[in-house]
Image: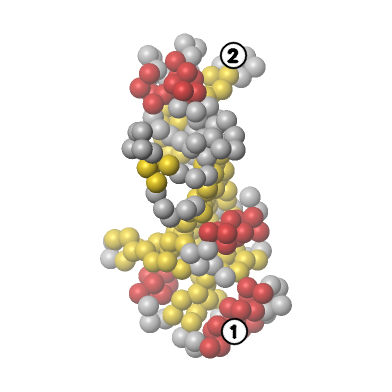
Amino acid sequence: MDIKEIYEKFDQIGCLTFATIDDGYPETRIAHLFAYDEEGLYFRTMTVKPFYRQITETGKMSICGMSASPNVVHAEATGLPIFEPGFTMKATGDVREISFEELLKKENKSQGFAMGIKDIRRYRDLRAFVMDRFRGEYYDYDFDLATRDHKIIRESFSFNDFPTKFRGMKINEKCIGCNQCKEQCDVKLFKAIEIDENGGYFINNNHCDVCGDCTLVCPVGAIDSYRE
């Protein structure tokens, strides 16, 4: 995903959860991004808010959100929740404050920058920030298979060379090809376990939900869950 696609997905969600650390504990609030360019994703807050102090002290932040109906409906027959197709987005990385003079140079880039500048002129304590290095994930779900034959599509991304780490499941060299993990995954309709041209089993992490069921049926302990 490029920066335009990342911003547009976040913008489609609208209100996002912004997370920081304060005295060793996580703090969250609802806010939104107002613009993007080749330097990153832009947001703003007031200097009098704890949010401002937290991001200036640490220079780190995480944002996430979900594009979906806020209502949870339960199936009468099973009592299980029914989720309409939707997606989530998250990004974690570095942020820095930018001066009003820097922001003015971007005024003609987009309506978002123009409106952000107008807002700062109206509320003079507002300050602008850019999230200029980050990693994240797009998670598209369709649990009831309304649009496809498997439940999820996920995609990791990195901006401005922010380091990424693998998180998920892998099949190791102990695999004996018994097919039990694939059968279990297919029954759950994730369909994340595939077979390569040499008959070897592997996990397509773009479809894997890291539910762990494959590890429970593997008779030889050939599936690892880890973060590199």
The colour scheme is: secondary structure
Label 1 neighbour load within 10 Å: few <14, some 14-19, many 20+: few
Q: From the top left corner, tell me how far across and down residue 112 is, in percent.
A: 63, 73
Q: Which residue appears at 57% of the width and 30% of the height?
A: 149
Three-letter code, disc 2:
Gly
User: Does residue 189 appear in the picture of this structure?
Assistant: yes
Residue 178: mark: none
**Where is residue 219, by image quadrant?**
top left
Q: From the top left corner, tell me how far across and down residue 152 is, in percent.
A: 53, 38
User: Which residue has dot 2 on it?
Assistant: 199
Q: Secondary structure at mark 2?
A: loop
Q: Which residue appears at 39% of the width and 17% of the height?
A: 218
Q: From the top left corner, tell me how far across and down residue 62 is, in percent.
A: 44, 59
- Look at the image and tell me in which quarter the C terminus lies: top left
Q: From the top left corner, tell me how far across and down residue 24 is, in percent.
A: 28, 61
Label 2 neighbour load within 10 Å: few <14, some 14-19, many 20+: few
User: Which residue has dot 1 on it?
Assistant: 118
Q: CA distance from mark 1 to mark 2?
A: 60 Å
Residue 204, placed above or below residue 138: above
Three-letter code, disc 1:
Lys
Q: Which residue appears at 54% of the width and 67% of the height?
A: 33
Q: Earlier in the sequence, mark 1 or mark 2?
A: 1
